[in-house]
């Protein structure tokens, strides 16, 4: 007797059970919850924990900088994962005909662009600078860190704005 072979189902195919089940979840609340989780994570790491470590008198500056060098790439991995989860949620909302979801999709693209600028342009420059400081070099002042902080603030405002918009303006049959 041959074992039963499971039929392949495209997870985002409108005829699949996966899509039908997840399309019943109010996507506006799901998207908002993910975005608010992301905002809290960003506030906690970038705006509270990171500045706080500079206040610890027992930590030498080299160690503080080295911790930051490792903290932000980990945060970025989590943030990129959240971009994917929100994008999948937006796709499900789009396929189920949620009004105004196109604006959320466009704003998510802007959020991803800001995150890309931080991850692939600014953070490598900051890491190179930190490595020079750790090596004992004297480095000249740079505006890269200020630009990174400005983009972090923009990112946080965008995430919160899209989360609030998702709750207020995305309609769902279930809400």
Image: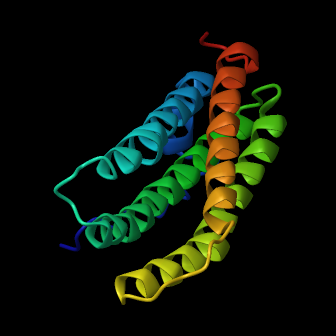
- Can the viewer see residue 156 in this picture? yes
- Quadrant of the rendered image containing residue 154: top right
- Up-down relation of residue 126 to residue 14 (above or below): below
**The furthest residue to the top:** 175
Quarter of the picture containing the C terminus is top right
Instruction: Identify the residue at image location x=68%, y=24%.
Output: 166
Instruction: Identify the residue at image location x=83%, y=28%.
Output: 100
Percent across and percent down for residue 149 are: 61, 52
- Can the viewer see residue 7 in this picture? no
Quarter of the picture containing the N terminus is bottom left
Instruction: Identify the residue at image location x=23%, y=74%.
Output: 2
Front residue of 5 and 31: 31
Q: How many marks?
A: 0
* Left or right for 24, reference 95: left
Percent across and percent down for residue 134 are: 36, 82
- Quadrant of the rendered image containing residue 114: bottom right
* Left or right for 127, reference 48: right
Front residue of 13 and 123: 123
Percent across and percent down for residue 168 are: 71, 14
Front residue of 135 and 173: 135
* Left or right for 58, reference 128: left
Front residue of 124 and 114: 124
- Up-down relation of residue 160 to residue 17 (above or below): above
Percent across and percent down for residue 36 are: 51, 30
**Which colour scheme appears in the figure?**
rainbow
Instruction: Identify the residue at image location x=30%, y=51%.
Output: 53
């Amino acid at each position: 007797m041959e074992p039963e072979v499971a039929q392949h189902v495209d997870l985002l195919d409108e005829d699949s059970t996966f899509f039908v089940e997840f399309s019943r979840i109010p996507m506006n609340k799901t998207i908002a919850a993910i975005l608010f989780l992301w905002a809290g994570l960003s506030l906690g790491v970038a705006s509270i924990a990171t500045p706080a470590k500079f206040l610890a008198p027992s930590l030498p500056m080299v160690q503080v900088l080295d911790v930051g060098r490792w903290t932000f790439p980990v945060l970025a991995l989590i943030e990129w994962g959240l971009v994917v989860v929100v994008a999948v949620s937006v796709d499900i909302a789009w396929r189920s005909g949620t009004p105004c979801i196109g604006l959320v999709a466009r704003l998510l693209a802007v959020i991803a662009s800001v995150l890309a600028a931080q991850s692939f342009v600014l953070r490598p420059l900051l890491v190179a600078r930190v490595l020079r400081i750790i090596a004992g070099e004297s480095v000249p002042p740079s505006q890269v860190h200020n630009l990174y902080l400005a983009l972090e603030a923009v990112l946080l405002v965008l995430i919160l704005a899209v989360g609030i918009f998702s709750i207020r303006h995305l309609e769902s049959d279930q809400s």
